[in-house]
Amino acid sequence: MADNGWSCLSLSLNVPGFPKSNTVVQLFFSHVLMDLKYFLRANTIALQDNDSICRADDAGDFYLSPCTGKGKSNDEIKLLCEDFEENHPLGRFIDVDLNDAQGNTLSSGKSKPCFFCREKPAIECRRLGSHDDEQVRSLMFRRMVEYCSQQRENGLVKQISSLGLKALLEEISLSPKPGLVDKFSNGSHADMDYQTFLASSAAISGWFEELVRAGFTFNGNDIIRALPVIRNIGLRMESDMYDSTKNINTHKGLIFLMGLSLFACGKLYRQSDQFDTELFRDIIRDICKDLVKNELHFPDGSETTHGEKIFRRYGFSGARGEAENGFPMVFDFGLPQLMAFKVPGEDALIKCLLAISSNNHDTNILYRRGPDVLTAFQVLCRNALENFNTENYTEVTEFCKRENISPGGSADLLAVTIFVNTLIHQDQSKNLTLLSQINDF
Ligand SMILES: [Zn+2]
């Protein structure tokens, strides 16, 4: 090894007592190794990974690889390794060592403080046997579990949020769509286009991570207290949406539905490594329990919003009812259409939209044109779904143009369906830490 004049870099952990390795140590080690590899690459230090050794034996977990600093001296590389140890949250457990091409260990001579007492140098406590190995080990393993859990949370939050944005972009890009804004048409909208939706998607997606994390870290036993938390974030999203669109409502309904979904996912993945349809629906139902009764029933006629007026006039509860019932449009109508395809392409997405809009009492249409136009639209959608061809689909599109309607509520539900479908097919095993690995310990 390193016969080409390269130095050798090694990673190991300071685990006192025996055994030196176990499930959690190995999990932590793989996290640190990944952290180290990114750190080195970012500092233009190359490892020769296909000539590396990575193993766990009686001496513990161990990685060794030839490395070159592309012009950096060994002293500079050693300093960077120390920098990595010092700045890593659990750097005191970690040893990154460097040997030159002749096999000599480069040492900075710096001593690390003991992670247990934080008073004396670690080497002294170890030599004197100042602390009980079992106590040190148990504290160490607890810290490792916390670190791996935090990494798992961070990974999931990023992953779920990016799938939320992907769903929004897939929905808006689907073209042609009846009455809705798509890539080539503004549908029945005079005040917005594809670019408006891109701007709005970018603006609101900045909050997705916060929603997922809020669900992940939600500790209240009373899940009904989650709604104000979600709405607090949702109101800020709305404000950013209006800023990005110059006061046009592109995503208000979506913010409600996706906000709930992202929060529910955070809560779900805290308890599970897999997306669980029933668990997800239960969380949504619990969060939105009695929502229609509490927010749409105004016997005194004091309703002010579109949703409240629609409910009073026609008895349709819109997005609130949909949420209170655990998204039946998504799971009973939209999702089966997407699940029928291995990789849902444009036809699958159009069928999904048609299945939703032939059943959904879209409040956007009701508010603009009333129940007769809505029924006629639903009949055309059902026909286009059952006899799926371009002609029947064009009939739906032409009808929306003629009647100047846009099934915006159904488009929001399509985005949620795309999101859920992706989560169902997402392979969680690529996450470094699985819940089962932490819980087993
Ligand atoms: Zn100590």
Image (cartoon, grey):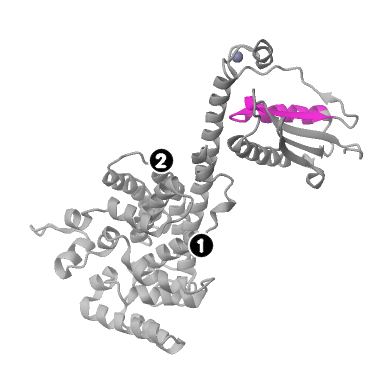
Left or right: 180 as drawn, with respect to 68: left
Left or right: 94 as drawn, with respect to 402: right
| Image x and y of residue 16, in percent | 64, 23
| Image x and y of residue 79, in percent | 75, 27
- Image quadrant of ligand 1 equals top right
Q: Which mark is residue 217?
A: 2
Task: Report whether residue 130 is seen.
Answer: yes
* View extreme (left): residue: 300
Residue at screen point 24% across, 76% down: 369
Residue at screen point 52% across, 37% down: 441
The answer to whether mark 2 and mark 1 are in CB contact below 8 A is no
Badge 1 marks a residue whose secondary structure is helix
Left or right: 297 as drawn, with respect to 420: left
Q: Is 367 rendered above or below residue 200?
A: below
Query: Which residues, given as a range, are shown in magenta?
Result: 75-99
* View extreme (bottom): residue: 391
The residues bearing labels 2 and 1 have C-alpha atoms spaced at a distance of 24 Å
Q: Is 256 rendered above or below residue 380?
A: above
| Image x and y of residue 413, in percent | 37, 66
Badge 2 marks a residue whose secondary structure is loop
Q: Give the mark, 2 or 1, whose residue is nearer the N terminus.
A: 2
| Image x and y of residue 76, in percent | 79, 29
Task: Report whether residue 188 is seen.
Answer: no
Judge whether residue 95 is colored magenta.
Answer: yes
Q: Mark 1 points at which residue?
A: 425
Viewer-proximal residue among 346 and 182: 346
Q: Residue 238 carries which label?
A: none
Viewer-proximal residue among 102 and 187: 102
10 Å crowding of disc 1: few (<14), some (14-19), many (20+)? few
Question: Which of pointers 2 and 1 indicates the residue nearer the eye?
Answer: 1
Task: Please state which amino acid type lies under the numbered disc 1.
Answer: His
Q: Report whether the residue tagged 1 is closer than 8 Å to ligand 1.
A: no
